[in-house]
Image: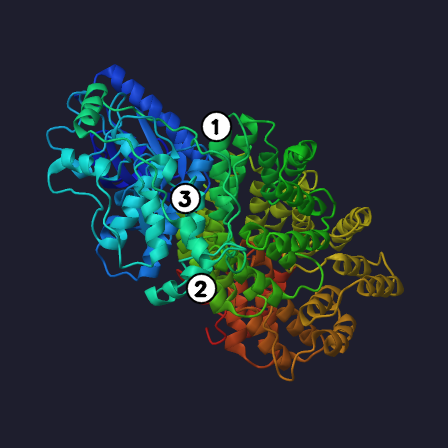
Amino acid sequence: MRFSPGESFDRYVIESLLGEGGMGEVYRAEDTRLRRKIALKVLRVAGEADSETWGRAVARMLREARAVAALSHPGIVAIYDVGELDGAPFIAMELVLGRALRELVGGDEPLGTRLRILLEIARALSAAHQAGLVHRDVKPENVVVRDDGAVKVLDFGIARKLARTSGDLLGPTADGALVTMTAEGALVGTPAYMAPEQIRGEDIDARADQFAWGVVAYELLAGKLPFRTDRGAVSLMASILSDEPPPLSSVPEGVWQILARALEKEPDARFASMDELAQNLHAFVTAEDTKAITSRRNVALAASGETRASAAASLEPPRPSRRPLVLAASLVVLLAVGGAVVGLRAPSVEGTPSPSALPAPAGPVPTAVTELPIPSTESAAARLAYREGLQAIRDATWETAVAAFDRARQADPGMAEAHLRYAALGAAFDIHAAREAFRKAIGLRASLSERGQAFLDAHEPVIQNDPPDVAASVRKFAAISAKWPGDAELVFWHARQLHFSQGNVDQEQVLALASRCVELDPQYADCWQTKQYALRPLGRYEEALAALDKCVEVSAGAVDCLHDKIAIVSMLGKCDVAAETARRWMAKEPSSPKPHMMLGGALFGAGEPEAAVRAALDQAERRFRSIGDLWHADDLAARRAMTFGEFTTGARIADAMASMTPPVPHEELFVYHLRTFARLELGDLEGAAAIADEYLVKSSLRAGVVMVDHMPDPTIFMHSLRLRAGKESRAEYEAARSSWLAKQDVSSDAKRRMAWDAAYGWPAHSPELAREALAEEGELMRLPAGEVDSGEAGRTGALGYVRLLVGREAEAVPYLEKATQFCPMLGSTLLYMHLQARLGMAREASGDKPGACSAYRAVLSRWSNPKESVTTREVEKRAKGLGCDVPAEGGLAGPRTPRLSNPNAG
């Protein structure tokens, strides 16, 4: 019984039927765990096959599928999962969108294009042979040319049709040249592409695939098969056994020599391996037209020290004496024993090919992360989980990758690479678990490859150090990405670590690395995400959004890119786009708390009713708790309370979090921010100063402050709280500030502005401190005359607030207006409300009553309890003094808040 679209099979949701055969169907489906499209082959027992035959066929197929799953080559369709569910065996495979090679036969593609396709097929087969696998059914139907030109070889002996009996091999509906069989005791392969030894029922090895490749190559280049097909299957096989293929005059002589040698009747007369064949063919894949290819023929084929004549002679197919071929006898053997069934076995190639004399390709060979070798292991489960993890890395689904590598290391505790990758990615979620895994990887270091050991060494400064030494990691990744320049993953990590380092980051360099990563592997979603990381600080937001759209295009599961898109559109004030993106994320990852949290923030920014905002945030909190993430559940609860002016509740939750260990060290800063902010709003300056003392003591015990993104260092702000509370003298405050500034890197505009914000803008709370901040603007901010800072809202707001404090209200308005033109998400709602209050004060002092009332309403619509907030008390007093039409306590005057950032509203 077929599946219908929308039905589920294990973790796969069926989307459509792609094809069917005697052993089941192939569906297009979505893997709900990896959040990507796959091809799902589900096998059904054939009605005419007995249970014993079926059982043997299925067991062999699953065994072969697991063997193929260990392959890692861009030209071979990847197998993600193999198993059985309710008695139905299944295989989850890479979904390849493109055209079957069959569609190109007889077409008008340039000769260079066809030769490139044949070379990629040869390389894929070579990789399989080196792994001990023989395809057995190479034909145009089993090759797909993807839309981007990449070539994929399908069906490594996985889905053949069960024959009815050994005496009815071709079946009543057979079309000689196109029938494929694979039952025990039956002919294996498609007759038109079978090697002579395969037809004779002899044992075959990798050279049978070489013969089949030769037939495919001939057909693609000539538009027809090299042997007779006009008299049915028996005549076809007779022609393969006895006839010589007609020479091709339409291709360079050297190409024909390669084909003729691959099509030799005797295996010993063919190339020793597909690798040797590919090395020779590579010389001709240098242009898209015959003339250019022909002009390079003799030079490319000439080996070192050989003349052109001897080089050409070396490719001349040897002509060993052949034993007479008696068609009748061969067919008797074939029909008597049903052909020898050849499983996946090691190719019997004598020796190793001599080094190629051909020139190496220009530039590094691109290597995707999914093309990296699978670690040696006896555990099939570990191998499959590790492969799944690599694919999840490429798809930018880190949580999925971490879970996959965790399964791999559980299945094989000795798999060092699984421990290492779990640590490298898991450090972003839980540094403590990551360090434990990293220590295990260190203990197994000797089993890592040279690249693996370098990868471990480059991560060590970040995972093992507290705080992380990102600069050291950058230096190490720069060295190893130079050593393996085609390795896309190493280039990605170099770019990522550079972007997040604490020094003078050159975002143009980050952008160059990310662009190089994209060139090496356009399907590597993390490279597109890193590209937007570099574009955002450069102010190139539209390009950053385009990069994020590309990220989601290449990986439907790259929800981190949706998160970053929300961040950008929120900064641009596009709350509606932020909400739509959050819902899109929610559809992809319905069980995750994060999209619900982002949706709540977007709805808040859009001025939606409190009930709608709370509903989204409540869903997020429940999901955090259901997965055991109590830290983020409590963090969300504290922020939600403060978002609606419930500072007593927010302070209580945040205080309780102080005894918890954050999953990632920098998140501790957020708790200190929440605790001090709540105390200030409650009018408890002494309590805020006590928390500042706690922070400063703890930070002094650390080697440095762990920062995140562009959040300013809170050290001087904490000193300013002590100054306000009378716990620190002005001289002590200035000394602390001078000491802090002396340690800062102010060699770039971005770093200078961050230093100004942390040392002057954020801590300013009095006209005196505001005047000092203005005095340092020229040195640290260095804004062109008349320009309003277009960076972080907090910094731009601080530029306005210090002007407000010194009585320059008219100058403050444009800064504060610009600072409020963003969509506040849950992490920035407190900042947004303060900026609205300050904007109202600046407009009021400038004589703009409607503008002031609009800003005041924005505050009072959310913070309506004056007992809970000093800001609410001040704003309420001012609004009443102006005669503003303010909302009643606990709700809005109308169904929705007016657009908060519109200075003309109200």
Q: x and y percent of residue 881 in the render?
A: 58, 72
Front residue of this view, candidates 556 and 573: 556
Q: Considering only vertical position in the picture, is 40 above or below 598?
A: above
Apparent side of residue 746 relative to residue 10 in the rendered image (left or right): right
The residue that disc 1 covers is 381
Whichever of labels 3 and 1 marks the residue nearer the N terminus, that label is 3
What amino acid is found at the position of numbered circle 3 in the picture?
A: Ala
Q: Nearer the viewer, mark 3 or mark 2?
A: 3
Considering the numbered disc 3 on the image, is that residue within a helix, a strand or a loop? Answer: helix
How packed mark 2 is, by other alpha carbons closer than 10 Å (few <14, some 14-19, many 20 or more), is few
Secondary structure beneath disc 2? helix
In the image, taking residue 41 as reference, residue 653 lies left or right, namely right
Q: Callout 1: helix, strand or loop? A: helix
Q: Amino acid at mark 1?
A: Ala
Name the residue carrying label 2.
Answer: 546
Residue where numbered disc 3 is placed: 124
The residue shown at (43%, 41%) is 126
Quarter in which the N terminus is drawn: top left
Colour style of the rendered protein structure? rainbow
Q: Contact, CB < 8 Å: mark 3 with mark 2?
A: no
The residue positioned farthest toward the bottom in the image shown:
785
Residue type indicated by callout 2: Ala
Q: Residue at x 52, y 72 (%)?
A: 853
The picture places residue 552, in percent across and down from the top left corner, at 42, 54
Q: Quadrant of residue 3?
A: top left
